[in-house]
Image: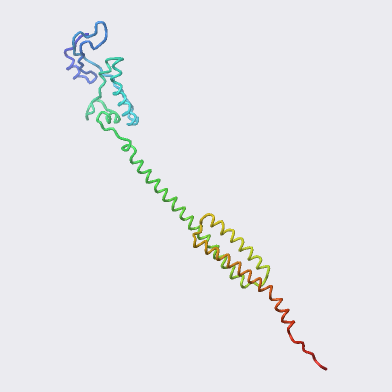
Amino acid sequence: MIPINAAEGMAARSQAYQKADIAAGFFRGSPPQPKEAATTISVADRLEARQTISGEIITDLTKRLFAMRRSLQNEGPIASAIEKPDTEKGSADAVHPGAAAYYDNDEKSFMDRYGDWLYIGAMTISGLGSAVAAMFGLTRVRARKAALALVDQLIEVKQLAHTTVALTKLGELEAQIEDLSTKGLRFARDKNFDEAGLAALRLAIDEARRAVSDQRDEIQAKPLLLTNAVAQSPVHETNP
């Protein structure tokens, strides 16, 4: 091994070279070399990465590399020479942002990396939840209006029953009441009625049925009343 006394000057003239101090016995052998500490010229091997690779990946790779440096020395003492490049502005080498974050102790935590996205996600989920709740609320309002419309239809049936004079028409109204009653039960099953609405539906069904029943009884009683009236009328005889 030949010491280079002008190593510092040579390194200053070209960025490809660096001055290196080699300790005595640094290289294994029999005997180990060099016998005495020496100054020489070295050429650095650089681990490079594309700028397009994620900063998080390079930060993790750099961290692992320096964590393994001590164990790598068991395979080759040269591993102890692994060092970070110059990260100062204007340096000859452009350091990857991911590696610079590790060297400058500026690593981003999970919240630093994804905090904004988590916040946006939470706001989005909250907004979607509000929208879904509003849609369900609107659906329930519409369903409740449709359910209460049954009460209005039953009221109309009741009023129509009072003016009906045909038994066949009363039969149709009775069938309509049963149909509306079935729909009302389904609305109640789906909880589209509150207690007040359910009570109103029951009352409307009972009133409509009573109106049909009373009108039927009245129509059926009219022939009997007419017969009784004829039977009780005085008989007038005309004498010649």
Q: Which quadrant holds the C terminus?
A: bottom right
Q: From what the image shows, is residue 215 above or below residue 42? A: below
Whole-percent x, y for residue 68 in the image: 30, 21
Residue 11, horizontal then vertical, whole percent = 20, 18
**Residue 102 picture location, percent across and down:** 27, 29
Q: Quick check: 76 above or below 111?
A: above
Quarter of the view holding residue 181: bottom right
Residue at 59% from the left image edge and 69% from the top image edge: 158
Taking depth in this image into account, of 65 and 4 the one nearest to the observer is 65
Q: Is residue 158 above or below residue 55?
A: below
| Residue 182 as seen in the image, left or right of residue 141 | right
Q: Position of residue 22 (x, y in %)?
A: 21, 14
Q: Going by the picture, which residue comes out furthest to the bottom?
A: 240
Q: Quadrant of the N terminus?
A: top left
Q: Which quadrant would residue 159 be assigned to in this image?
A: bottom right
**Rendering quarter of residue 209:** bottom right
Q: Is residue 12 left or right of residue 153?
A: left
Above or below, 175 relative to 80? below
Camera-side residue of 21 and 107: 107
How was the colour assigned to the protein in this rendering? rainbow
- Left or right: residue 190 compared with residue 19: right
